[in-house]
Amino acid sequence: MPEFIEKPHLPEGKVKLLIAGESYQKKLAQPLEKLGISVLWMPYNTSVDPRVAGHVDLSLVHLGGNRLVACKELTGSNIFVNYLTNRGAELIFSLEELGLEYPADARLNVCIFGNYLIKNEKHAERLISELRPDLSIIDVKQGYTKCSICVVDSESIITSDNDIAAKARASGINVLLIRPGHISLPGYDTGFIGGSAFKIAAGSLAFTGRLDGHPDEEKILEFLSGRNIEPVFLTDEPVFDIGSAIPLFEEYN
């Protein structure tokens, strides 16, 4: 029986179940299935902009283990909620409602990995810090924090945000700062690196598409190689932002 991942975004084994937005099912279901990964497709969140209504990183936060904070709007999604609770997940619903515009849509867009919680203190859902008081908080200007951070390992991230990079480095985190842009997100000028990638095993990082068109492709691949992380490209399209995915269950060899 697969186990819940203890530390968000940092599986120690192979991911067996992850949560992703249902709007990306057509593109990603088959390549993930070929990797032996099942997906729970999150329904649209109609409280945020329709262009990102299927972005998991706006609607859910994995606190670690079986605990997740979910936006209030998901309370009516019975099939989705029941699937999780029937498998032992504890869903804790947010205190504040999301909104159509920034920063109200970014209340759950925080990044938890290792011993860190990176977030915009002013706008983030306060319940998250209360439930994980053990984490070291890094307060940043960017409200779309998880969007902007690709977690590589417990001490390493990739971002295009200068403020996140500076504050993460000051906290002892290894950071690869890349150029912004070059990631597709229909309806917007650009997407984010954190929204286009997610861990699928301890040593594997999945990208939604190819990095060929990204000017920092070589730097990204070198950064991953230096940490013994293998990139996995799920499609042959240029990399695109899906609001990331939440690895939830894993199994060990």
Image: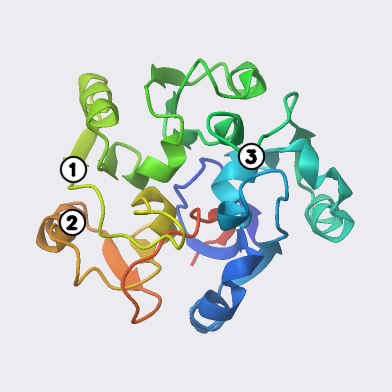
Report the residue marked by disc 2.
220
Relative height, residue 131 to residue 98 (above, below)? above
Task: Compare marks 3 and 1 and give the one earlier in the sequence.
Answer: 3
Q: Quadrant of residue 162?
A: top left
Element at badge 3?
loop
x and y percentages locating residue 188 in the rendered image: 42, 54
Task: Compare marks 3 and 2 and give the one earlier in the sequence.
Answer: 3
Report the residue marked by disc 1.
176
Decide if residue 155 is on the left or right side of residue 242. Answer: left
Mark seen at residue 100:
3
Q: Quadrant of the N terminus?
A: bottom right
Mark seen at residue 191:
none
Q: Quadrant of residue 80?
A: bottom right
Decide if residue 172 is on the left or right side of residue 76. Answer: left
User: Which residue does the image show at 77% across and 33% down from the upper left?
Assistant: 93
Q: How is the image coloured?
A: rainbow
Kind of residue at badge 3: Leu
